[in-house]
Image (cartoon, rainbow, N blue to C red):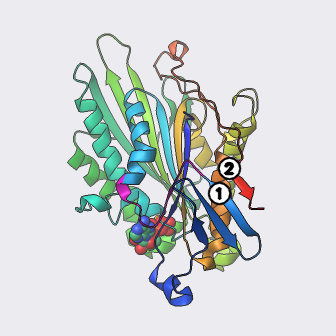
Amino acid sequence: MANITVCARFRPLSSKERRDHGDSVCIERIDDEAFNLKDEKEGEMKFSFDKVFYDDSKQDDVYSFLARPIVRDVVNAINGTIITYGQTGAGKTYSMEGPSILECDDAKKGLLARVVAGIFREISSADSIKYTIKLSMVRLYLSKDNMQIKKTKSQGISLPEVTEISLSDIAEALQSLSSGICNRAVGETQMNVGSSRSHCIYIFSVHQESTIQKRTFGKLILVDLAGSEKVEKTGAEGRVLEEAKTINKSLSALGNVVHALTCGPNGKGNHIPYRNSKLTRILQDSLGGNSQMALLCCCSPSPSNASETLSTLRFGARAKHIKASPRVHSTKDKHAKTLRTSFPSKDESCDKVA
Ligand code: ADP
Ligand code: MG
């Protein structure tokens, strides 16, 4: 099994898209792993991913496929990252949070609530081990670009200025997430505008102490990325334009890190440009090397968004080739044990339809 899972998710057409284009969509379903995309300029292309979630997909389908295996691993001290990528309005926050973090309808709960429940479920079944779960939340945008990031052998990447909360149960975790940085800041300004220009980062760390093993910990980072749309489209000026440029820079830095991890011999020996953005620095020990990663490429199915959808899917297709070997993370790093080596598939994940 490859340690990077790349999925595409198409949300239902919005009422505006229906008004403008009726029921027409830019994709043609092949099966649960492939579809054709039609773009006016670029023609028709076939895309394959580990899984494709169409507009009838359930929140739990997404969790079960791409997040549950990572949650199981984090409890065993293997780092993980789950990223939602895509243009503004494509369904990143819906996939991550659901309609809200405190959503009561089980079917609508997003990845965050399910991850929390998953972590607590996993630790409750291991009663010989004592666990501590901590959460920190970061909203990364232009004005926070001077945030301090530290790297130590024992803790990996840490953020000294960011508060870490200890979580004792699911309810407390959801309450903390709900009143967390991302939501509060979004509520203060115009909602969609604010959230589309920043990356919301949720960091869970699961520390275990047992009598037989050394103290170990795993870190699971969920990232609801800023909108990936091109700057020109936003009609931005001044500070807004500067912010848009910074976002584009950090998304392309993420793309470049993914690309370097993909192309290098086993991810070793070649230079991985983690230092080119705060985002990639924060994710440094959770992407590639010692980590499990899942990328959810969120897309609109409307013909009016086909070119943005195409660029989102290309980002995902490029990510597909990451190679890495996840290891157990111990406070004594030299004792880190290789658990599993993954072999990425060499087949192309995007081909032109002949
Ligand atoms: P983004 O975070 O990518 O900017 P949102 O998650 O806010 O986009 O989604 C935009 C709109 O589409 C919201 O009103 C959201 O409720 C709706 N939406 C997104 N994905 C789905 C889905 N899978 N099912 C139903 N509604 C969705
Ligand atoms: Mg959003």
Q: Residue at x 57, y 35 (%)?
A: 2
State whether residue 149 appears in this view. no
Which quadrant holds residue 324?
A: top right
Which residue does the numbered mark 1 point to in the structure image?
Answer: 47
Q: Nearer the viewer, residue 181 or 354?
A: 354
Task: Where is residue 221? Give x, y as percent.
Answer: 46, 43
Left/right of residue 287 with respect to residue 202 in the rendered view = right
Q: Nearer the viewer, residue 275 or 118?
A: 118
Q: Residue at x 47, y 73 (%)?
A: 192
Check mark 1 vs ligand 1: CB closer than 8 Å? yes or no.
no
The C terminus sits in image quarter: bottom right
Mark 1 and mark 2 in contact (Cβ < 8 Å)?
A: yes
Q: Position of residue 7 (x, y in %)?
A: 54, 52
| Residue nearer the viewer, 139 or 305 | 305
Quarter of the render that holds ligand 1: bottom left
* Residue type of the residue flagged with mark 2: Ser
Q: Cβ(mark 2) to ligand 1 < 8 Å?
A: no
* Mark 2 residue element: loop
